[in-house]
Image (cartoon, rainbow, N blue to C red):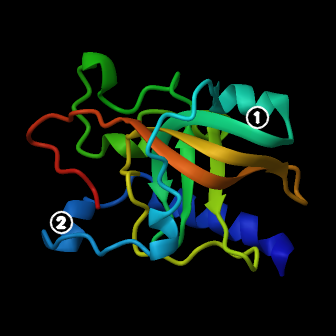
Amino acid sequence: MKKLTIPILLGALALTSCSKDPAAESGGRPSPAPAAAMQALVLRADPGPSLGVDEAKRAGATPRVAVEGRVHDVIKGFAILKLMDASLPYCGQDGEKDRCRTPWDYCCETKEERLAHSLLVEFRGADGSPVATPVIPEARRCDLVKVTGALTIDEQGNPVLIADGLFRVERPELPADVAWPE
C-alpha cells in the first residue's frame, strides 16, 4: 500500500497542473481554517540558511535540512505540497510578456522541466500518515517558502521532504486581473 502512495500523489499533482481557475471554483468563499496540527508547524522566524530544491535533491537523504522553493501545488485535504526550485520562473514572473491566468501551475515549462525541479513535501502525523487539513497556513501557490525536516528517498527512489516546519519568505504580487487560488 505504501509503495503506491507517492505515485498516486504525484499523479494527483500532475492532474491539477494547468487547471481551471481555483478562485472561480471556490465561488469567492473564504478558505477553511487549517487543522490545529498545521498551525503548530508554522515557523515564526526564518530557519536560516537553506538549500534550493535542486541542491537538496542532489544532496540526497539527510536527517535535517531547510529547503527553499515556491509552492507549486497543494493536495486538497492534506498537508502535502510540491515545491519548485526558485530558479524556475513561474509563468509571467520577471515581467515576461506571457500574461498567464494561472502562473502557479508552471504551464509555460515542459513537464520534464517541472519534474526535474520539483520536490514533494509531506507534513505527517504521529502515525506517519499525511496530516489531514483543509489548508496549509502560510502556503499559497507561488509563495516562496522555507520548509524544514528530513529529506528521505522513497521506495521508488524519489526524494520526499518529511516536513516539521514552514516559513513564508515572500508572497509575490500578481497582475490585478489574475485571481489567487485558494
The answer to whether 13 is drawn above or below residue 37 in the figure is: above
Residue 145 at x, y percent in the picture: 47, 39
Mark 2 Cα shell of 10 Å, populated few (<14), some (14-19), many (≥20): few
The residue that appears at 62% across and 40% down in the rendered structure is: 118
Give the residue type at disc 1.
Lys
User: In which quadrant is the N terminus drawn?
Assistant: bottom right
Circle 1 SS class: helix
Q: Residue furthest left?
A: 176
User: In which quadrant is the C terminus drawn?
Assistant: bottom left
The residue that appears at 28% across and 19% down in the rendered structure is: 96
The answer to whether 12 is drawn above or below residue 92 in the figure is: below
Circle 2 SS class: helix
Foreground tag (1 vs 2): 1
Quarter occupied by residue 44: top left
| Residue under label 2 | 24
| Residue under label 1 | 57
| Residue 158 appearing in the image | no
| Residue 99 appearing in the image | yes
Mark positioned earlier in the residue sequence (1 or 2): 2
Mark 1 Cα shell of 10 Å, populated few (<14), some (14-19), many (≥20): many
Residue 135 at x, y percent in the picture: 40, 67
The answer to whether 57 is drawn above or below residue 44 in the figure is: above
The residue that appears at 29% across and 28% down in the rendered structure is: 92
Give the residue type at disc 2.
Ala
Left-right relation of 11 to 177: right
Task: Count how many numbered circles sit on residues in the image.
Answer: 2
Residue 56 at x, y percent in the picture: 73, 32
